[in-house]
Amino acid sequence: MKAAYLFSALVLITGCGRLEQNLFPIWEENYFEIPPAAPGPFAIEEKRVHIEDGADGEPFGITVFAPVDAEGPLPVFIWVMGSNVQAYYHQSLHELLASWGYLVLAPDTRPLLFTDLKYHSRIVLLAEQTLTLALTGAIGHEVDVGRIAVGGYSVGGPLAAFTAARSAPVSAIVYWAPSGSPIWQGLRPRTLYPLVNAASLYILGELDDNAPAEGGYPDKMQAAMPAPFEAFVIEGASHHQFQQPTGADQFSNTPEISRETQQGIAITKTREWLDAQFAIIRN
C-alpha cells in the first residue's frame, strides 16, 4: 500500500511538472531590432545584482536598468513577473523607461511549481526585498522614496498589487493586461486587494480574451481596490503582444495591430502616466 501511494505521488508530481512546462514554458530571447517607442535622453546600463540571501530562503538575481549620468535621487519602477515570465520578455519597456530617467528593477521569478503551495507569495517576497534593497542603497543608486512604482503583466499584474498592498512606499501601480490565476499559492486576494491605496493604471487590449477590457479580471481588481485608477484600452490589441514574440502567441486572439505598435502605445502611456503621477516635468 505504501509503495502504491509513493508511486501515485510520483506520477502526480511528474504530471504537474509536464503541465507546468506546457502551460508556462520559458521562451527564448527575441528582442526588437528597433525600439517600439521614442527613447529618452539617457544612455542606459543593464546589469545583474546577485542576492545570496533571498527572502524566500534561496539566492536570486535582480536585472537592473539604470540611466547613465542621471542625477539622483531616481524614481523607481519594479516589474513583478508572473508564472515563469522572464525579464527579457519586456526588455523594451525596461530599457525605454530607464532612458527617461527611471531606475527599473526586475527581480527574478521562481520556476513554476504547482506543488509549491507558496509559489506566488515567494515572488512577492522577492519584489518586496528588491524594494528594500533599493531604498537602502544596496542596488547602487540613490532612489526617491516618494516616487516608487510597481507593475506587472498578466499574472504579474495582481502580484504587483499584492506587493503594493504590503509595501507602504509604493505610490503608483501599472498593470499590463492583468489576469487571474487558478491558484494564488500562499496569498489571499480578498484580504490584500482592499489594502491597495496606490493610484493604478490598467493598460488593456481590445481583443484580449485573457484579461478582457470589460467583464473580466481587471474589472474584479478595480472593484476590490479602493484606490483611484485609470483604464486605457489599446484598440486591436491582443494579450500576448504585450510581451516579446514567443510561442505563446498561438494562444491569443488574432491582433489587428502590430506588436511594435501595441508595445509602443503601452510603453509611452506607461511612461507618461508615471511622469504625471510623480510630477516629473520634461523639457
Image (cartoon, helix red, strand yellow):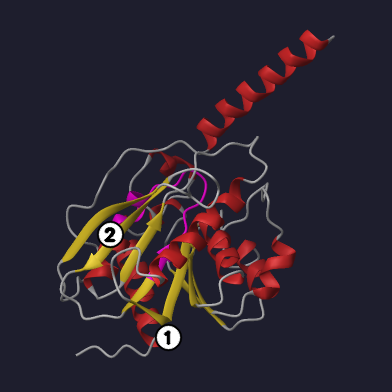
> Is 13 inside the magenta-drawn segment?
no
> Is 81 inside the magenta-drawn segment?
yes
Residue 134: percent from the left, percent from the top?
Answer: 39, 67
| Distance in Å between CA atoms under marks 2 and 1 | 21 Å
Question: In this picture, which residue range is highlighted in magenta?
Answer: 77-92
Residue 59 picture quarter: top left
**Horizontal side of residue 258 vs 125, given as left or right:** left
**Which numbered marker is on residue 277?**
1
At horizontal 61% and vertical 53% (from top left) the residue drawn is: 121
Comes first in the chain, label 2 or label 1: 2
At horizontal 56% and vertical 77% (from top left) the residue drawn is: 168
Residue 228: percent from the left, percent from the top?
Answer: 58, 84
Q: Which residue is mark 2?
A: 92
Residue 211: percent from the left, percent from the top?
Answer: 56, 59
- Give the answer, above or below, for where 122 lies relative to 267: above
Residue 194: percent from the left, percent from the top?
Answer: 70, 74
How crowded pointer 1 is (Cα within 10 Å; few <14, some 14-19, many 20+) is rated as some
- Give the answer, above or below, for where 38 lies relative to 64: below
At horizontal 46% and vertical 68% (from top left) the residue drawn is: 150
Residue 178 makes an appearance in the image: no
- Give the answer, above or below, for where 217 lies relative to 69: above
Residue 164 makes an appearance in the image: yes
